[in-house]
Image (tube, helix red, strand yellow):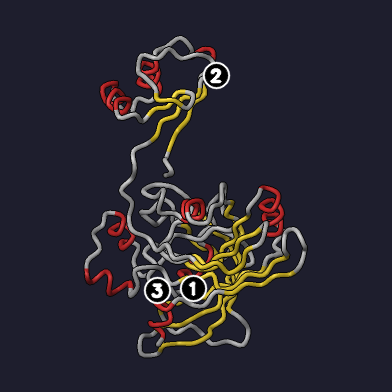
Amino acid sequence: MMHRKNSVLIQPQQAGQQLLDFVSQRFTYRSQEEWQAELAANRFLLNDTEARGDAILAPGDRLVYLMPALIEPPVASDYTVLHEDNDLLVIDKPAPLPCHPGGRFFAHTLWALLKEQHGLAEPRLINRLDRETSGIMLVAKNKATARLCQEQFAQRRVEKVYLVLVEGDFPDTVVPVEATGWLGSDPNSAIRKKMRFYPTQMDAPPGAVASSTTFRRISTASTACLSLLEARPHTGRCHQIRASLLHLGFPVVGDKLYGVDEQLFLRFQEDRLNAADHALLRLPRQALHAASLRLNHPVSGMEMEFSAPLPSALQGLLD
């Protein structure tokens, strides 16, 4: 069983203290009595053995705190293996499923599933998808493969195509619609992490980064006023596709942060979404899917292309 854990290597100036005193003074977010209870629950290891509160610390000791298990929200854990060899694993990630531990998630993450179910000692996730985004992800099985894959992404030699379902009748143009500009913080949003697309650098705040995506309409559902688009990001910015589409006036279906109303995100965080909110969202997840990816194999150099079909929940809205 995997544990969330923190570890500390005892320095010479910290030696000579009793373990309970050290922990209470170093980690003040709990009282000494609370740390005593954690010790009694056998949540501390000192050099890989159960620790006592009166143990005297020595230089070089390794103190490990095994954090209590989280009560984690449910996720979709049925990932599909698209390709596997000695160096690389390619999967189709479902939604909702976080990639890495953080916040309320630890065991309910792709990282943990790959360790527990796929036997990878240290999964190295090359590209990252939001918890509510599905589709193709690359996982390196060793450090050298991870570095070679990351180099291709950094040099923009990887071709990525997303499918995205948006609100509204997106224009059906011969030339793809281009959203080239800058991504920066949104001063008008109550949500700190929300980004905003700016058409010119002059409009953008300090720290904004260049962003470029092209969009092409694939089909529409006229009765529901929805459009299915192909999105090709030419830069790899966080929230790039979603923020660009909001700027264009075609918010992503099911998107609580960049969708029709950001108040949905705040209510979602507080677990206060009501029936009317769910009807407005149409889906419990954002309708963004990493559909295909092309790159050279990091070891053999052979060109490889992978694809993942549009999830049935998204297809169902179109049908």
Q: Amino acid at mark 2?
A: Gly
Q: Position of residue 98 (x, y in %)?
A: 44, 56
Which SS class for mark 3? Answer: loop
Position of 79 relative to 209 (above/below):
below
Position of 57 relative to 155 (above/below):
above
Q: Residue at x 66, y 52 (%)?
A: 146
Left or right side of 103 for 91: right
To which residue does mark 2 refer?
A: 60
Front residue of this view, candidates 44 and 246: 44
To which residue does mark 3 refer?
A: 253
Marks 2 and 1: which is nearer the front? 2
Front residue of this view, candidates 310 and 200: 310
Position of 261 relative to 189 (above/below):
below
Front residue of this view, candidates 243 and 128: 128
Q: Residue at x 40, y 73 (%)?
A: 253
Asked if the residue under mark 2 is in contact with the one under mark 3, i.e. CB atoms within 8 Å, the reply is no
Looking at marks 1 and 3 on the same chain, the residue that comes earlier in the sequence is marked by: 1
Front residue of this view, candidates 23 and 3: 3
Q: Position of residue 282 (x, y in %)?
A: 33, 75
For disc 2, the neighbor class at 10 Å (few under 14, some 14 to 19, many from 20) is some
Marks 3 and 2: which is nearer the front? 2
Q: Position of residue 159 (x, y in %)?
A: 66, 69
Asked if the residue under mark 3 is in contact with the one under mark 1, i.e. CB atoms within 8 Å, the reply is no
State how far apart marks 2 and 1 are (Cα).
57 Å
Q: Position of residue 36 (x, y in %)?
A: 29, 22
For this orientation, the residue located farthest to the top is 16
Q: Residue at x 45, y 23 (%)?
A: 46
Labelled disc at residue 147: none
To which residue does mark 1 refer?
A: 248
Q: Amino acid at mark 1?
A: Leu
Q: Residue at x 22, y 70 (%)?
A: 275
Q: Amino acid at mark 3?
A: Val
